[in-house]
Image (spheres, rainbow, N blue to C red):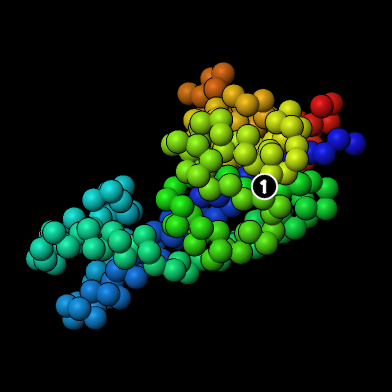
Amino acid sequence: MARRALIFDLDDTLYPERRFALSGYAAVAARLAETDGVPARDSLRVLVHALSEGHRATAFQRLAETLGLDPARVADWVEIYRQHVPRLRLPRSARRVLVGLRQRWSLGLVTNGLREVQQRKVEALGVDHLVDGVVLAGLAGEGGKPAPAPFLAVCEALSVIPARAVFVGDDLIRDVLGARRVGMKTIRLGLPSRCAGPAEADVVVERLDQVPEAAERLLQDA
């Protein structure tokens, strides 16, 4: 049988990306406790509330305003957030799926984002030891996914042609459209969307443990 591959997105596919945000917020809160004597729980309360309310992009601005601190310090907090070593754990369900799949598939990972940040996520989760190739999308092509370059790069790393690869992700544009453009089959992790129309993935699953069976069906005649 010709070589085949199952390739995954990282954030909100193999683990909940919110956990990285919480880890970064904890690092900022710890620094503020050291430099300003602000109890870490107080800083965390503001940041987590902003995240929960959908204001992640302005969380640090809200923190400065709430604590009465110079908003110019936001840039420093962003840097702490980006540079911290995250405390992350790959969910057992994801680990179980990857370990099981590796017996029958070549496995890859393609992730968007700042190189250093994504590399630290991969290392903290230990996912680099569970797949055969990792592509940090910003390095493979301008803008990362959905550009073709990172998808083609992971296929090259795994020595597989796109037609023999299935991409698994949560995002219709970055993951599904990007992978489809280079000839991959696609699986979207999430709830079915009536708005997706013809842009929807070949298969939509609600849980990661449904991926193996779906992927087998997609390539059974390929």
Image quadrant containing the C terminus:
top right
Name the residue tied to disc 1.
108
Q: Is residue 200 above or below residue 21?
A: above
Residue 128 rendering spot, x and y as whole percentages:
63, 59
Horizontal side of 54 relative to 9 (left or right) equals left
Residue 147 rendering spot, x and y as whole percentages:
51, 31
* Label 1 residue SS: strand
Image quadrant containing the N terminus:
top right
The residue shown at (54%, 66%) is 124
Horizontal side of 208 relative to 150 (left or right) equals right
Place residue 4 in its image quadrant.
top right
Horizontal side of 3 relative to 49 (left or right) equals right
Q: Is residue 178 above or below residue 59?
A: above
The number of numbered badges drawn on the structure is 1
Q: Is residue 202 above or below residue 51?
A: above
Q: Is residue 91 above or below residue 145?
A: below
Query: Toward the viewer: 87 or 96?
Result: 87
Residue 144 rendering spot, x and y as whole percentages:
48, 38
For label 1, the crowd category at 10 Å Cα-Cα, with few meaning under 14, some 14 to 19 and many 20 or more, is: many
Query: Toward the viewer: 213 or 148?
Result: 148
Using the rendered image of the protein, determine whether residue 132 is visible from the camera's viewpoint.
Answer: yes
The amino acid beneath tag 1 is: Gly
The residue shown at (70%, 31%) is 162
Query: Toward the viewer: 121 or 147?
Result: 147
Residue occupying the far right of the picture: 1
Residue occupying the far top of the picture: 198
The residue shown at (53%, 40%) is 140
The residue shown at (68%, 38%) is 155
Residue 79 rendering spot, x and y as whole percentages:
30, 61
Using the rendered image of the protein, determine whether residue 205 is visible from the camera's viewpoint.
Answer: no
